[in-house]
Structure formats: C-alpha cells, structure tokens
Image (cartoon, rainbow, N blue to C red):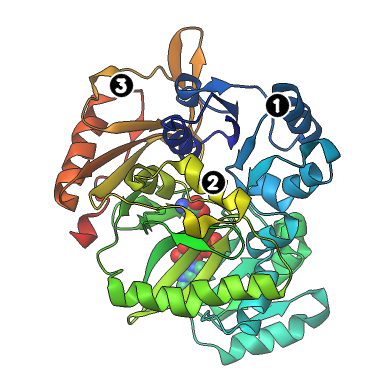
Amino acid sequence: MKVLLLGSGGREHALAWKIAQSPVLSKLFIAPGNAGTGITGTNVAIDPLKFNEVRDFILQEEIDMLVIGPEEPLVKGLRDFLESNNRLKRLNIIGPGKAGAQLEGSKDFAKQFMMKYSIPTASYLTVTKENISEGFKFLEKMEAPYVLKADGLAAGKGVLITHSLEEAKQIVVEMLEGKFKEAGKKVIIEQFLNGIELSVFILTDGKNWVLLPEAKDYKRIGEGDTGLNTGGMGAISPVPFADALFLDKVRKRIITPTIRGLIQENIDYRGFIFFGLMNVSGNPYVIEYNARMGDPEAEAIVPRIKSDIIDLFTGVGERNLNKVHAEFDDSYSASVMLASGGYPGNFEKGKEISGINKVTESLVFHAGTKMDGNRLVTAGGRVMAITSLAKTMKDALSMSYRCAGLVDFENKYFRKDIGFDLC
Ligand code: AMP
Ligand code: GLY
C-alpha cells in the first residue's frame, strides 16, 4: 500500500507516525510535511492546494491511498477534482468532497443542516448586506455575550465574542464590509452557550462510523484560558466529563442524525468528522463541525488508536467500516504544545532546536519544524507537541511536562496548566 498524506502540522506527524506502523504499508509520502514527517516517511515539496501537482504525483507514484489532513484542500474540492479523473478511480481518498466539507467551509450551511435534522446547536440568524437591520433587531433581543461568526474559512480567526451590543453591531458591519474577505459575506449571529467544550471525532464511510477517543483542546495562549486564541496549545484524552451517559447523548442526538442528514442530502461523506461540542449542563450542543481531525487533538488521540489505521481507512474506502475491528487504548494521553515566543502574534523562526534525543518516555510530534542543512530549526508558531500515555492523567501530564523541559530552543513557550482543570 502506497500512501500520500497531505499537510504539514503536528496532526500530520501524528497520522504519519501511526500510518508508518502498518504492516501493509510499502511507502509513505507526506506533502509538504515537516522535519518530523521527514523521518517517518518521505517528504515531497508539493503544496496541497496545487491540485494538478497532487494529481500528477499520485499518478506517477501509483499511490493507493490519499489522506487529506487540513481543511483547505477539502473545502476547495480536492476530492472532487481527483474523482473526476478516470485514471484515479481506484484511489481511496480519506476526506470528504466539496459538498461534505461545507459542514466546515460554511457555517451557514452547517447551521441550516443542523436545524433541518434537529441537531442541538445555538439559535442563530444569518445576516448579509441585504438584511443588516434584521440582524441588529436579532442582537437587540439577545442577551450578552454576543457571538459573531464569519461564514467561511478564516484560519481560526472568524469568531468574535463581545459583551457590548454596540461593538457586536460594529463587528457585523465590519465583517460584511470585508474584514474576512469572502468568508465574511455572510455573518452568523449566534446565541452564547455556557459550558465546557470538548472535541468528538468519528471516522465514517458515509453510512457506518467509528467513534474515536474524544479530547479537550486548550485554545488560548495564556494559562487559565486567557489571551488570544491559537490553533491549540495542548490536548488531553479521554475527557473525564464525557462519561458513558454523555457520549450516549452525543451518539443519539448528534452523530446519528448527522450521518442520516448527510445520506438524505445525497452527500457521500468519507473521512473524519470533528464535532466541536459544548457540554451545557450535561447536554451536548454542536458549536462547529470540521471536516478533518483536530490539531492538537490528533496528537493526543492518534496514539490511543490500537487498530491498524490503514485497516480503518480501507474500511472507509470499501464502505465496510462496520467489519473493521476498531480498538483503543484506555490509557490517559496528554499532549503539550511547545510554541515560539510571541505566537499567535509575531514570532521569529529559524531557532535551532536541541534536546529531542533526550526525550525517551514521550512521543514528539513535530509541527513547525524544518531541517536547515543538518540543523533542526523552528519554522512556525506551534513547534512541536509532546505526548505521553500513562495510567492516570496526572502521570501523563507530568511525563509530558518533564519532556517539555528537555527540548530547547530560543524563546520556547508552553502553557503549564494543560489538563489541570480536569484532574
Ligand atoms: P469556532 O471557530 O466555531 O470553534 O469558535 C471558536 C471558539 O468560540 C469556540 O471554540 C468557542 O470557545 C467559542 N464559541 C463559538 N461559538 C460559541 C457559542 N455559540 N457559545 C459560546 N462560545 C462559542
Ligand atoms: N484544535 C481545533 C482545531 O483543530 O480546529
């Protein structure tokens, strides 16, 4: 089996690490990858958004399976583009087509879908330039805080929450006037949900699905969940409050109707679905859908997958995921992200990284790293995730923190409170 994995973050290194363990793998390529994936497999310098180059490489290398890590190629229709090619009929693609990826690519689409299929979510109104005054009236009837979302992909920056009604109105106008370019042509005004967030994942062949371990992501840069939003500063799995009863509600109220809705809409969804949920007094609500695995959630949960991930992906391609045995490790997993000082604002790149070879008890998943000659250097805001598995969350966290201290680069920053709210 020859596999091509697209992406370059910690999520992709975690997936590459897992794919590389499969006995049926003959060759793993990662495009464009990072210094970590370059050890796990072979990096190729192709931009996942250059669809022609991706197609040519797949044909040239006779790739059997394509795993699409990030959202942009999914939302822009890479799957549809490849499926329209007669020579690629046998390629197994993990990741939905353009229609399915709308769940992430258009918050308006996702909201309409949830309403249609009675999936619990915050009440909302979609506003365009044509109905701004209706939007203002909707805001006036709501209570603070106000949640405002750009409809399209905005690199994680498209959600703004404010306590001021005046500011909320101003944000709606700014978004509609192009603050987020095309992504803000529609703005979703949403009821604020009070609760604790968690991330739930499934892998689906369009009909059957496997529930993967859930995770909690720590999104803010500062300790105690303060400061700016980031891609994610760490993750833990399992999530203690996601007990059997809660997960049963997630299955019945959210996952099952989502799959049923996709089937009814004639959307042939094959890949991951990431449910960003809010636990409101023991009841799950969908905050967002994503059409991919989370990052850094993948770094925490992929090591808990015991089954061969290629078997699971083959089940997706052959639409018999119900016949594949999915097994998970019941250890606790804690992943701490090491970042470049300054992130998510300005930060410097090219800092030499040392000490990784001293990490023996934890897994190191590279994110923003690259090789500069034979030096390993930083190449992004989030540099690497340190993941540990242990019998208790406390032990997993102390292992990750011990190892986080062993790796060094100038201006290294990490949150020291990942998981402590839940142990
Ligand atoms: P999203 O990009 O949709 O994940 O939103 C970013 C963050 O905004 C989420 O992780 C939540 O913390 C917060 N958020 C989004 N929607 C709501 C909501 N309706 N109520 C409360 N918080 C929200
Ligand atoms: N960690 C959140 C995300 O991947 O969107």
Q: CA distance from mark 2 to mark 3?
A: 31 Å
Q: Which residue is mark 3?
A: 356
Using the image as rendered, state which of residue 312 and residue 414 is in the foreground.
Answer: 312
Using the image as rendered, state which of residue 224 and residue 323 is in the foreground.
Answer: 323
Using the image as rendered, state which of residue 346 and residue 123 is in the foreground.
Answer: 123
- Residue 281 appears in view: yes
Q: Quadrant of residue 196?
A: bottom left
Q: Secondary structure at mark 3?
A: helix
Q: Which residue is mark 2?
A: 313
Local crowd at mark 1 within 10 Å, few (<14), some, or many (≥20)? some
Q: Secondary structure at mark 2?
A: helix
Of badges 2 and 3, the one in the foreground is 2
Q: Give the amino acid type for the residue marked by disc 1 in the picture.
A: Glu
Q: CA distance from mark 2 to mark 1?
A: 18 Å
Of badges 1 and 3, the one in the foreground is 1
Quadrant the N terminus occupies: top right
Q: Residue at 58% of width from left, 92% of height from top?
A: 141
**Residue 242: percent from left, percent from top:** 31, 68
Q: Is residue 285 left or right of residue 93?
A: left
Q: Quadrant of residue 205?
A: bottom right
Q: Give the amino acid type for the residue marked by disc 2 in the picture.
A: Phe
Q: Earlier in the sequence, mark 1 or mark 3?
A: 1
Q: Give the amino acid type for the residue marked by disc 3 in the picture.
A: Ile
Q: Is residue 336 left or right of residue 351?
A: left
- Residue 162 appears in view: no
